[in-house]
Amino acid sequence: MIRKHVYFEGKVQGVFFRANTREKAVKEEVTGWVRNLRGGRVEAVFEGSQEKVDEVIRWCKHDQPRAGVTDADIEEEEYTGEYEGFEIRR
């Protein structure tokens, strides 16, 4: 099990990025959270199997329906298992 902390940049606010990310994460059985940041970026933490976490991140970067990710800063962190689901934070 792994944990990745990601900062997405580009057209990622006002395009249902958080809701779509939550839907994809739940489908892939990935836990964590996602939130908007001041300045237009989106921050997210994903926990789960390597394959599923990487799939959610790949999907966020390339297949979001209305978003346009121009950069994703991905940091690997120690897996904690602290999340029971995937939530949108405000």
Image (tube, rainbow, N blue to C red):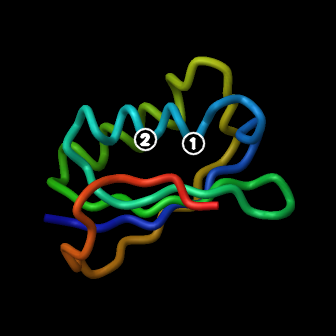
Left or right: residue 24 versus residue 49 is right
Give the secondary structure at mark 2: helix
Compared to residue 47, the image places residue 8 above or below, namely: above
Image quadrant in which you'd find residue 7: bottom right
Q: Amino acid at mark 1?
A: Arg
Percent of width and height locating residue 65: 58, 18
Q: Are marks 2 and 1 in contact (CB under 8 Å)?
A: yes
29 vs 65, left or right, is left
Residue with the mark numbered 1: 18
Q: Residue at x 59, y 52 (%)?
A: 72
What quarter of the picture does the N terminus occupy? bottom left
Vertical arrangement, residue 72 with respect to residue 60, above or below: below
Query: Residue at left 39%, top 33%?
Result: 23
Res. 75 image quadrant = bottom left
Q: Is residue 37 left or right of residue 23?
A: right
Distance (Cα) linking label 2 and label 1: 6 Å
Label 2, on which residue? 22
Percent coordinates x, y for residue 16 in the rendering: 64, 31
Callout 2 amino acid: Arg
